[in-house]
Amino acid sequence: MEANKQELETLQDIRKIMERSSRFISLSGWSGVSAGICALIGAFFAHRVMTTGNNYVEYCILNPMTISLLIIAVLTFAAAFVSAFFFTYIRSKRNNIPIWGTTAKRLMWNVGIPMTAGGFLILKMIEMGAGGLIAPACLIVYGISLFSGSKQTLDEIRYLGYTEIILGIIALWNIGHGLFFWTIGFGVMHIVYGVYMWIKYERK
């Protein structure tokens, strides 16, 4: 019985070593929560800017309101990225796992390519005045990016990606309510995901 227990522990140790070498497992649940909170704050300020204009469609035109929204979007992304990196760094140090190893580089590559391409697509939408499609495009591009990077990290990322894609597709047929879906996708779903990840992997 004792020999079987030792063999099981050995197999578990081998599995952990293999996961560390092939998958980036240092993502913290608090990273998701902090990113979601940043998104909610950004959505609050974006809503205030949009309601000061004549209507919800005018933000597609390059005017002061559009510039304000772009600044809010950049600041929100920067704050979410920094906070997510901070909590992931803390967890990596706690687990004694390098945060910038080969697996992390593959993850960033797989996520970065679709996000970069999607960023150019969204900029073109702004240039052409297709403002109503920006929020759905953001959700879909982000969901595809998560799906692309999910093979290099925890499986839960894939399901978050599915959720973002579905919300983006629904938003395509609800033009004019893009900020609502954007808030649910980037704000609420990140918080739900983060809390779930914390409970499953970090609470102990």
Image: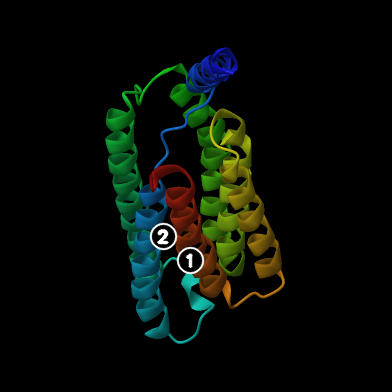
- Drawn side of residue 137 relative to residue 204, left or right: right
Q: Which residue is mark 2?
A: 36
Q: Real-space Cα distance between discs 2 and 1?
A: 6 Å
Rendered residue at 52%/57% (across/down): 127
Query: Total of numbered circles in the picture?
Result: 2
User: Would you place residue 169 above or below residue 96 in this image?
Assistant: below
10 Å neighbourhood of mark 2: few (<14), some, or many (≥20)?
Answer: many
For badge 2, the amino acid type reads Gly
Report helix, strand or loop for mark 1: helix
* Residue 24 sits above or below residue 163 on the image: above
Q: Earlier in the sequence, mark 2 or mark 1?
A: 2
Residue 85: image quadrant is: top left
The residue depicted at 57 percent of the width and 16 percent of the height is: 11
Look at 38% across and 44% down and name the residue there.
Answer: 204
* Residue drawn 48% across the image and 66% down it: 188
- As helix, strand or loop, the secondary structure at mark 2 comes to helix
Q: Quadrant of residue 174?
A: bottom right
Q: Position of residue 13 (x, y in %)?
A: 49, 18
Q: Which mark is residue 76?
A: none
Q: Quadrant of residue 27?
A: top left
Residue indicated by mark 1: 188
